[in-house]
Image (tube, grey):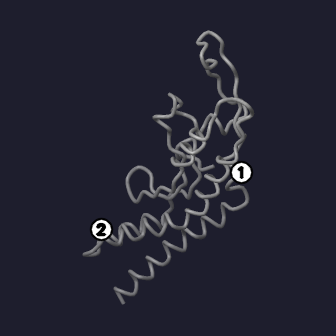
Amino acid sequence: MAGGGPPFALGVETHEGLAALTRAIRAEADGKELRKDLAKNMREALKPGAAEAKSSIMGMGSGGLRTGPALRSSIARKIRPEVKLGGRWSGARVKAFKTRNVRGFVNAPKRTNRAGGWRHPLFGNREVWVQQHGKVDWFDRSFEGREGVYKQAVEAAMENMARRLAARAG
């Protein structure tokens, strides 16, 4: 997992190359379009990882308890690649965003991923609480062994933009 980003994301952290590339893009007359293009290409590089994470959560079994397809599909809809250029954090990552409108289960992506699971009141009985477990490490396992591939793809998108800028200057 990425250190320094949110607790539930995997990504490529800031390095000097991205900061320099962002500064060079700003100096161009059509810098806004170039930034959009770079961000789009970086997101495209991470889409296979996001698709793998979505597939992984959709494979979570219900275990007889009421998880329903709505929980899994709601979590899957909230998994997407994110790119930020400049500011406090710069880089690209795949992030599982919070699920605001799913049965009051805002932290569903994080809770279904952890070994300890989550506690909730039994359906129809607010006094009895039960412990429920999801698919342990479904998010993390989606990227295991392929972090380098995604990092290379993002760096290739950055290299392509740097070459485009160099070709303009020279």
Looking at this rendering, what residue extends furthest in the left direction?
29
- Give the crowd class for mark 2: few <14, some 14-19, many >=20 residues within 10 Å: few
Q: What residue is at 58 percent from the left and 43 percent from the top?
A: 8
* N-term-proximal mark, 2 vs 1: 2
Q: What residue is at 62 percent from the left and 34 percent from the top?
A: 111
| Residue that label 2 marks | 32
The picture quadrant where one finds residue 134 is: top right
Q: What residue is at 70 percent from the left and 27 percent from the top?
A: 132
What's the residue type where badge 2 is placed?
A: Lys
- Give the crowd class for mark 1: few <14, some 14-19, many >=20 residues within 10 Å: some
Q: Is residue 20 above or below residue 129?
A: below
Element class at badge 1 = helix
* Drawn side of residue 30 relative to residue 117, left or right: left
**Front residue (pair 142, 154):** 142
x, y percent for residue 27: 29, 72
x, y percent for residue 67: 64, 34
Placement of the C terminus among the 4 image quadrants: bottom left
Q: What residue is at 74 percent from the left and 34 percent from the top?
A: 63
- What is the number of callouts on the image? 2
**Front residue (pair 111, 160):** 111
Q: Is residue 153 above or below residue 113?
A: below
Q: CA distance from mark 2 to mark 1?
A: 36 Å
| Residue that label 1 marks | 141
What's the residue type where badge 1 is placed?
A: Arg
